[in-house]
Image (cartoon, rainbow, N blue to C red):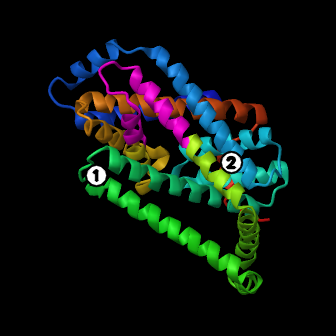
Amino acid sequence: MSKPLRLGALLLVLAVFVVAAFAAFDQEGAWERASLGLKTAKWYYFLPMFGMYLLSHLLRSFRLYLLLNRAAAYGRVFVINTLGFLAINVLPFRMGEMVRPYLLKDSEGIPFSRGIAAIFVERIYDLIMLLVMLLLVSWTVDVPTLHIELGDQRYEVIALARRMAIALCLVGFGGMFVVVLIGEPLFKIMERLPLGLIFGSFSRSFREGILGLLRSPMRAIGLLFLSAALWACTIYGIQFALMAFPTLPSTSDVALTVWTVTLAGMTAIPTPGFLLVYELCCAEALKLWGVDSAFAMTFAVILHLGQFTFIASLGLFFSIREGINMRGIAAKSQSVED
């Protein structure tokens, strides 16, 4: 099957899956109420939405470019970042996470451990921003206990995401402290363990990157502001999507709530491709603002399809241009070494 056909099949599966999610919220007259909202939609608002997504992706790639200490051209980092996010969205079990460091090594000669270290720090910045957004939402909205159900499991999304973000930040900062403080003696001990050469190489690259940030605190602060800017672009993109539907509230605090709750859910419950959890969390966020459950789920489906279509289309373009087979790259990335 050709790459365009495979992408079409993925989009079809996504559409079927999210329609099934909508059905879980269905009640008498739900489809009719949702269709009324769609009839009044101003679809041209999706153009600036995609523009905001593109700006966010450009800023995200620039952040990775800086974390790699400009070891590769920005244009190449942008391409690799795009392919990596396509892999994260279409491959199961988070297999796509290793694609970016693999491509950085394979095409740019950047050590695999250095790429992983840069992406690890990138994730720490994102977790910090998630905590900030959760704090802002708590000031903006009286958020009740928010549960979603997946099968027989019931998850308290906001509380679970907050605990996970705090725990991961503590683990990340703790790891930074230990690696930076102990340094080479720790690496020599690690190298005696199974897979020690890989972990030792990663830790050295990680320590080098952290020391680089510590030597330049303004650079570290700049990366934090850059992280805030790229997430702000995503939130404004969602606000444009809300503005496309006159029946929906479309202020910036609504957009902030929608993305924070959705991102919290994807962090706490990372289903393959973020299917179902994205729709459920997005719909629940809108219901906090009094939106009808049927149309809230309809918007969630549209928003997820819009975000997925953006990254999938961009990623497909570069995968065809680069001649890359995503599954093949994902398989190779699981066993690569420096």
**Any magenta on residue 266?**
no
Which numbered disc covers residue 151? 1
Q: How many marks?
A: 2
* Three-letter code, disc 2: Arg
Please say whether residue 236 is one of the residues in the magenta stretch: yes
Q: Name the foreground residue: 63 vs 324.
A: 63
Q: Is residue 336 above or below residue 261?
A: below
> Which residue is the site of mark 2?
63
Give coordinates of residue 137: x percent, y percent.
37, 47
Chain part drawn in magenta: 231-259
Position of residue 59 in the picture relative to residue 136 (left or right): right
Q: Quadrant of the C terminus?
A: bottom right
Q: Is residue 123 left or right of residue 193?
A: left
- What residue do we see at 69% from left, 62% from top? 117
- In terms of secondary structure, what is the magenta stretch mainly? helix
Nearest to viewer (mark 1 / mark 2): 2
Q: Residue at x 76, y 72 (%)?
A: 204
Please state which amino acid type lies under the numbered disc 1. Answer: Gly
Label 1 environment density (alpha carbons within 10 Å; few <14, some 14–19, many ≥20): few
211 vs 224, left or right, is right
Picture quadrant where residue 230 is located:
top right
